[in-house]
Image (spheres, helix red, strand yellow):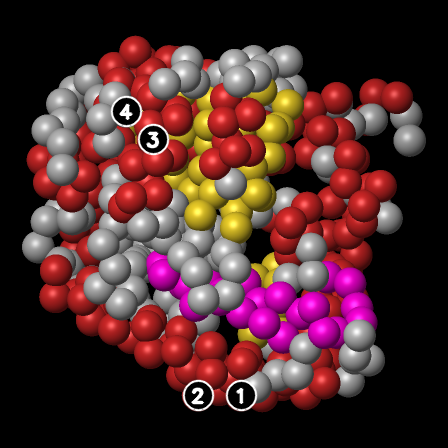
Amino acid sequence: MSDSYQPTTRLRRLEVPERAAIEGASLRELERELERTPAGPEFLDITYADTHRFPPDSWVLDEFVKAASGAGMTYTPYRGDAGVRRAVAEHAGSFLGEKLDGDREIILTPGTQAALYTALSAIVEPGDTVVLPDPDYITSERSVRYLGADIHPVPLLWPAGESPRLDLEALAAGLRKNPKLVMLSHPNNPTGAVFDPAHVAEIAALIADSSALLLVDQLYSRLVYDNKPFAHMMSEPGMRARTITTLGPSKTESLSGYRIGLAVAPPEIIDRMEDVMSVAALRCPAYAQHILARWLDDDADYVAKRIGEYQSLRDVSLAALGEMPGVDVRPAGGSAYLFPAFPGIDATDQEVAIALKRDAGLVVNPGYQFGPRGRKHFRICFAQEEKAWDAALNRMAEVLDKFPRV
């Protein structure tokens, strides 16, 4: 290839070449191999939810059409329509337990992924250190490395029969390195772990006693099971002025295709994020923004039904996985994911993912995508049509049963 078409240094960082020593290839090389693998005859991508089985609330399309028909602005400010931001401030403030200023503390973004990347771009510089749980969301490490920063990993611990927690000693050690940022997802993606409020307070106390900012992805914070209490990081003592919280309706409310999300942050961070937006996406999709004016407002019954349906699917999945020899899984406290481990199966993440795609027609996320501690796992999204999901679990069991045991 001509030197003119060689990947930039930033793009080479997205490969996470450091992992090649562990996995035998860079992340993108492994993923391209998986992408090239032909799918079996019964195809189901279980890396995301079935939004046909679980559609948005009935009013969503009406609000979008109304905005697109002339009621909404076409060119909004970079941080979003002012009226929508004020409505979001009221509703998100009630959800987070904090009074928010829609003009100064909220920015609307093209999905929560854009909120994360825009925040990182506004904060992180080459050579900075970012503290990150292991495992964590699929793009977190890649985005940090793309921006030239270093990762200090903190193990996510979840022994059988215990509540999930971060390794606080490792977190404290990371904070002693004077990192620019601590970044985490809560509920955790990929595991579905939800931290007890007491543990959230422990995490927050360590961060509040440091110079680091906190970027917390709370995309799944409405989707919590078993009536479990959920504590918001920004509401902990000393955290309001140093926390960036990303939220959005793409998952619980099935609005992924509308590409809308947001960040709540101190005014100076929002200003920086707006600067990034001005040279990246310019703005969140203008007509879709208006859906956010009603989001978090009058959908308690809708969300309660969604949680009940997903929890039933989670429990069915746990029961089925629990019967598969060599497989071990923890019950997600939130999100729509499970992260089964397969300590008793003699295979790598890649071998399992390729076999499930080729022989069962199931696309899963191999665990290495989420960090070194994700190895010997795979992530599945159980938010699927019930009959199709039952059949998928049966095919999964058949394929896994063909591997030799450890």
Q: Residue at x 79, y 68 (%)?
A: 347
> Which amino acid, mark 3?
Ala
Q: Quadrant of residue 61?
A: bottom left
Disc 4: which residue: 239
| Front label number (3 vs 4) | 3
**Could you tell me how far apart the alpha carbons at marks 3 and 1 are, in whole angstroms?**
43 Å
Q: Which residue is mark 3?
A: 204
- Between label 3 and label 1, give the one nearer the viewer: 3
**Which amino acid, by three-letter code, is at mark 1?**
Ala
Dot 2, crowdedness within 10 Å: few (<14), some or many (≥20)? few
Secondary structure at numbered mark 2: helix
Q: Residues within 10 Å of mark 3 (few under 14, many from 20)?
A: many
Q: Earlier in the sequence, mark 4 or mark 1?
A: 4
Q: Secondary structure at mark 3?
A: helix
Q: Residue beneath label 2, please?
A: 387
Task: Decide which of 359, 288 is in the foreground and name it.
Answer: 359
Q: CA distance from mark 2 to mark 4?
A: 45 Å
**Callout 4: few (<14), some (14-19), or many (20+) C-alpha neighbours within 10 Å?**
some
Q: Residue at x 43, y 60 (%)?
A: 162
Main SS of the magenta part reads loop
Determine the secondary structure under disc 4: loop
* Residue found 13% across the figure and 37% down from its top: 97
**Residue 193 higher or lower than 58, as above or below:** above
Q: CA–CA distance between discs 3 and 4?
A: 7 Å
Q: Are marks 2 and 4 in contact (CB under 8 Å)?
A: no
Would you say the residues marked 3 and 4 are in contact, meaning their CB atoms lie under 8 Å apart? Answer: yes
Q: CA distance from mark 2 to mark 1?
A: 6 Å
Q: Which residues are magenta?
A: 327-349
Assess whether mark 1 and mark 4 are in contact (beta carbons under 8 angstroms): no
Q: Which one is earlier in the sequence, the residue at label 3 or at label 4? A: 3
